[in-house]
Image (tube, helix red, strand yellow):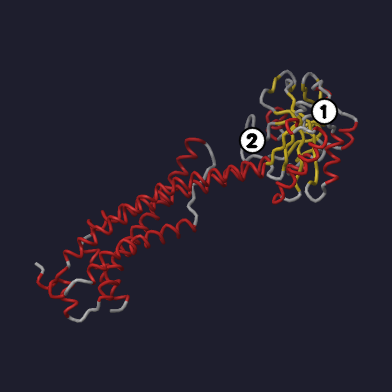
């Protein structure tokens, strides 16, 4: 008997008992659906995390100089020297000074705008573009000029889109707006990426009345060497402070890898738990195939009496089990894709988070392969039992 004939007979037997077959496939359908949705959710979360970290700069090392337990300190020039000493790992550095002073436009107080002192290289480091006017310049840093660059939301909300040449007050000091950043977010909002004020770090240090700079941002030459770049900065700082508690170096790339690793582990555990239903489905297939062998004992006896080989009988029942399981896998994949689309719409509507639950092609192929393998594995024992039936005893069976 050819494979096409075997396959055709399997479909006929399955179709003759549709309700029982569907109930048998239910465990496979649920298992495959759960795995598809969970893996799709994990994939969507990884992409969302990557996009979120990308906006912060995955090629950025953030350094906090705490100075705990040490009377020594480092200056901005010392940090620039670290870049010069490691040209293969680091390409640029910018001191960053966070300010908490009151921001005012005319008589209106702006509570949401983030005010940060940076260098003239900071915009290139972060990939920010200037839409109007100019960015910060080296001379602004050297002369501690009272100038600033503001975000698109701040410019549009408080200056009607024409902010260059206007003034803004930070901590009671009037700053002249020399540039407006290009819009970074799809929808600029209060407190978002586009609601910001950047001024020279030297000016920010003066206005904050501390005179010192405790935070720096380094650009990594190659993200694949983030670990080596972080180690180089830590070694240079340790040579100054001789105390690892005096500083903290954070790599966005390493943080992203850690977060995606945690997500992958959780998704893997959930997918494994969901996969247990595939085992349950396999047991169901084995059970129904044993029942089918019992019901079709006389048929098997007639086929063997007419010269059917054990291998033909074995192939017939294994194929039937595999087809049943594979059909369940296909239905599970279709249901999983539909639920993934529904989950995406629901998450977006409820949380306003652009997280897409999208099943990956490898996960779909793996789910289908496993579902078919489950059918073959759990269908083999009943098929073997059918193939070994004595034709005389089978013909006498009533």
Q: Position of residue 346 (x, y in %)?
A: 45, 40
Q: In this view, does 111 lie above or below 304?
A: above
Q: Can residue 261 be seen in this view?
A: yes
**Tag 1, which secondary structure?**
strand
Q: Which of the 4 image quarters holds residue 144?
A: top right
**Residue that sits furthest to the bottom in the current view:** 307
Q: Where is residue 98 in the image (x, y as percent from the top left)?
A: 74, 28
Residue 188 is marked as 2
**Residue that sits furthest to the front in the current view:** 242
Residue 316 is marked as none
Q: Is residue 131 above or below residue 175?
A: below
* Among numbered discs 1 and 2, the one appearing first in the sequence: 1
Residue of label 1: 176
Query: Left or right of 240: which side holds 268?
Result: left
Nearer to me, 236 or 132: 236
Measured in 3D between alpha carbons, the distance from the residue under mark 1 to the one under mark 2, in whole angstroms, is: 23 Å
Q: Quadrant of the C terminus?
A: bottom left
Q: Which of the 4 image quarters holds residue 258?
A: top right
Nearer to me, 388 or 359: 388
Residue count near mark 2 (Cα–Cα under 10 Å), binned few <14, some 14–19, many ≥20 = some
Q: Which of the 4 image quarters holds residue 11?
A: bottom left
Q: Could you tell me which residue is drawn at 55 percent across and 43 percent down?
A: 262
Q: Is residue 162 visible?
A: no
């Amino acid at each position: 008997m050819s494979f096409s004939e075997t396959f055709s007979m399997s479909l006929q037997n399955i179709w003759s008992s549709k309700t029982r077959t569907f109930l048998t496939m239910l465990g496979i359908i649920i298992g495959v659906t759960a795995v598809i949705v969970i893996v799709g959710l994990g994939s969507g979360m990884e992409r969302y995390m990557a996009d979120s970290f990308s906006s912060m700069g995955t090629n950025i090392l953030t350094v906090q100089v705490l100075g705990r337990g040490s009377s020594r300190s480092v200056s901005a020039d010392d940090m620039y020297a670290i870049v010069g000493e490691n040209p293969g790992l680091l390409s640029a550095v910018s001191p960053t000074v966070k300010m908490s002073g009151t921001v005012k436009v005319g008589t209106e107080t702006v509570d949401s705008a983030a005010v940060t002192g940076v260098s003239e290289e900071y915009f290139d480091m972060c990939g920010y573009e200037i839409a109007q006017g100019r960015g910060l310049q080296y001379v602004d840093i050297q002369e501690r000029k009272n100038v600033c660059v503001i975000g698109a939301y701040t410019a549009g909300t408080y200056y009607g889109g024409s902010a260059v040449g206007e003034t803004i007050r930070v901590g009671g000091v009037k700053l002249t707006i020399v540039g407006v950043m290009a819009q970074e977010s799809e929808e600029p909002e209060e407190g978002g990426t586009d609601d910001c004020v950047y001024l020279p770090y030297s000016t920010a240090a003066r206005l904050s009345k501390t005179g010192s700079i405790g935070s720096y941002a380094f650009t990594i030459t190659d993200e694949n060497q983030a670990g080596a770049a972080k180690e180089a900065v830590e070694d240079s700082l340790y040579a100054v402070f001789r105390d690892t508690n005096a500083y903290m170096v954070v790599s966005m790339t390493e943080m992203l890898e850690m977060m995606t690793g945690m997500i992958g582990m959780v998704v893997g555990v959930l997918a494994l738990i969901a996969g247990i239903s595939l085992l349950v489905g396999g047991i169901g297939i084995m059970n129904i195939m044993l029942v089918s062998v019992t019901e079709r004992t006389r048929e098997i006896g007639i086929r063997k009496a007419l010269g059917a080989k054990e291998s033909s009988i074995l192939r017939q029942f294994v194929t039937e089990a595999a087809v049943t399981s594979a059909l369940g896998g296909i239905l599970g994949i279709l249901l999983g894709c539909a639920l993934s689309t529904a989950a995406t719409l629901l998450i977006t509507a409820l949380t306003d988070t652009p997280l897409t639950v999208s099943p990956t092609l490898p996960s779909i192929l793996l789910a289908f392969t496993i579902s078919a393998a489950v059918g073959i594995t759990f269908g083999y024992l009943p098929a073997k039992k059918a193939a070994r039936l004595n034709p005389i005893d089978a013909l006498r069976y009533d």
